[in-house]
Amino acid sequence: MIRTIVLLLLFFASSAQAATVLITGASRGIGLEFTKRYAEQGWDVIATARSPADDELLQALASAHENIRIETLDVTDHDGIDALADKLRGTAIDVLINNAGISGGRNTQEFGAIDYSVFDPVMNINVLGPLKVTEAFLDHVAASEQKKIINISSSEGRLSQVRGSRQPFYRASKSALNMVMRNVSIHPTVKEAGIIIGILAPGFVATDFTAGLPKQMMITVETSVSRSMAMIEKYDLEMSGRYYANTGEEMTW
């Protein structure tokens, strides 16, 4: 009898499917750390980047973890997004993390000397990219158990917290991302499928994204991702479409 129970437990353990996460912008910063941490926890990780063949850190991470699958994805290439979604058809994605983003640079956004050519790339990558990825992979997420789409926003998108004048394009893109994803969260197709839309601020993180800024108030990539993963696990349907810091505080806009 005991032997039968043990064999049944082993059978169910071996047949259980690992959860799957897809991460955009997985080649650096918090995207790379998300990839590392989810892989270490036994998830199947689909790590995407614009030119992954050139990303040595991501390649090394994948070599060390057989549960990391690298795919090429440029979030401004809508045909490419559709092609990857078609390639992954039949793959249930428990957590989709829209992480890819750019700041547009600080010197290009100084009022009085603005480089207006920067605006479209910032909005295309930070707003339209996550929206298109969400549309393309909605069925993959709907087919999963956890059904979560997490969008990495920023406290810089909060109108209520604007003090100094800086990076208007980047700030506008994060405010737009918040509004876009709030809209997505209440769309009937999304609600009926039980999909959770998360809007998450990762904190002021020391990465190449924030290079040159004072580090006294920054947190490490490891701290940011630890807190963010805890919040991703906590996100439920009641929290869908709402904007949170990764410390758990609901953010005012």
Image: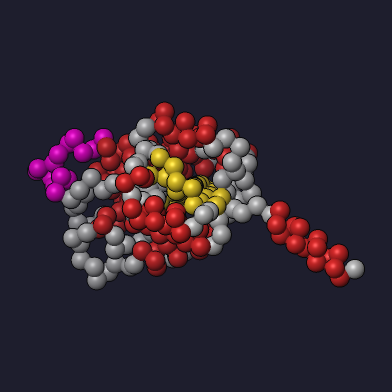
Q: Is residue 37 above or below residue 216?
A: above
Residue 223 lies, in percent from the top left, at 39, 68
Q: Is residue 11 visible?
A: yes
Q: Residue furthest right?
A: 1
Q: Residue furthest top?
A: 79
Q: Is residue 103 above or below residue 251?
A: above
Q: Residue at x 9, y 42 (%)?
A: 113
- The colour style of the image is secondary structure
Q: Quadrant of the N terminus?
A: bottom right
Residue 90 lies, in percent from the top left, at 61, 37
Picture quarter containing residue 13?
A: bottom right
Q: Is residue 250 visible?
A: no
Q: As drawn, is 147 to the left or to the right of 199? A: right
Q: Residue furthest front?
A: 63
Q: Is residue 46 above or below residue 188?
A: below
Q: As drawn, is 212 to the left or to the right of 184? A: left
**Residue 112, magenta (yes or no):** yes
Q: Nearer the viewer, residue 73 or 110?
A: 73
Q: Nearer the viewer, residue 250 or 73?
A: 73
Q: As drawn, is 125 to the left or to the right of 70? A: left
Q: Residue at x 75, y 57 (%)?
A: 12
Q: Residue at x 47, y 31 (%)?
A: 83
Magenta residues (range)? 107-120
Q: Residue at x 46, y 59 (%)?
A: 64
Residue 252 lies, in percent from the top left, at 39, 56
Total numbered labels: 0
**Residue 91, magenta (yes or no):** no
Q: Nearer the viewer, residue 179 or 204?
A: 204
Residue 60 lies, in percent from the top left, at 39, 56
